[in-house]
């Protein structure tokens, strides 16, 4: 029922190690990853070509993606703590509610053929492949950083690293992507994020353990 003695010793030892670690480096690395993928995308694929005619959907998409990245970075760092604070997830719930409202608006104002047609394009496939690769590289980088913090709950830390890596990847690629549909974002960004998250949950705990 309770925690085993060796598990308790491990948690206490890791907590002490954590107290000696600086908090800045993980945030710096996550911010740098956002900038690296944005710069890489703009350099390799080019930026958006519709900057002179941006719609409200662009601003909603960018705000939700950026908010998700900020929340993800914050929660990924907090996963290193011994005691979880579930109230920290309120930010994600607020973003999810905003996204659900945006999704509902799209499906009540546009035809299904118009919405799904955006997914049957080469751009969608390119988006998913690029975002997935960005996510894997981000995951590898964050794993090296967060292992130094000796996370008390490696499963939760792996969960948040995978989630944050996928969000960072999606925001980085959005510099190029001109599809501002919430359905498109859900599929073309969401599937790569899901893939990175699954790999993170399955693989990372063994690398995060001390």
Image: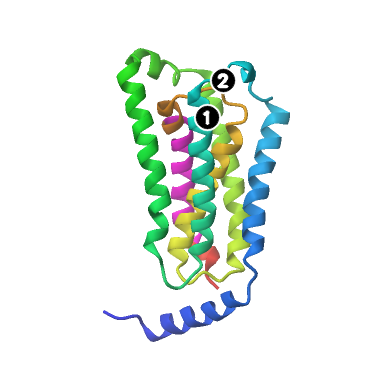
Which residue range is magenta in the image? 187-204
Residue at the disc numbered 1? 59
State the image coordinates of residue 210 (x, y, percent, origin top left).
Answer: 55, 73
- Which quadrant of the rendered structure holds the N terminus? bottom left
Instruction: State the residue in front, 65 or 126.
Output: 65
Instruction: State the residue in front, 21 or 148.
Output: 21
Tell me whether the residue at label 2 lies in contact with that at label 1, contact meaning CB atoms closer than 8 angstroms.
yes
Does residue 195 sit above or below 123 in this rendering?
A: below
Where, by quadrant of the figure, is residue 191 drawn? top left
In the image, 197: left or right of 18? left
Does residue 145 sit above or below 57 in this rendering?
A: below
Residue at coordinates 55% horizontally, 81% vertically from top-left? 16
191 in the magenta segment: yes
Q: How is the image coloured?
A: rainbow
101 in the magenta segment: no
Residue at the disc numbered 2? 54
């Amino acid at each position: 029922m309770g925690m085993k003695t060796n598990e308790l010793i491990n948690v206490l030892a890791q907590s002490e190690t954590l107290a000696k670690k600086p908090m800045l480096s993980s945030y710096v690395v996550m911010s740098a990853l956002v900038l690296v993928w944005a710069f890489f995308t703009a350099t390799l694929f080019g930026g958006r070509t519709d900057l002179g005619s941006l719609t409200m959907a662009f601003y909603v998409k960018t705000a939700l993606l950026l908010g998700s990245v900020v929340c993800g970075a914050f929660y990924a760092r907090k996963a290193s703590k011994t005691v979880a604070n579930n109230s920290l997830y309120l930010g994600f719930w607020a973003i999810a509610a905003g996204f659900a409202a945006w999704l509902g608006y799209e499906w009540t104002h546009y035809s299904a053929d118009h919405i799904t047609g955006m997914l049957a394009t080469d751009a969608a496939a390119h988006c998913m492949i690029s975002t997935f690769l960005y996510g894997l590289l981000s995951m590898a980088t964050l794993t090296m950083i967060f292992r130094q913090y000796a996370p008390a709950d490696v499963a939760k830390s792996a969960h948040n690293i995978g989630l944050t890596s996928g969000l960072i990847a999606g925001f980085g690629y959005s510099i190029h992507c001109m599809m501002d549909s919430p359905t498109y974002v859900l599929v073309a960004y969401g599937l790569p994020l899901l893939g990175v998250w699954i790999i993170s949950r399955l693989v990372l705990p063994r690398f995060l353990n001390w």
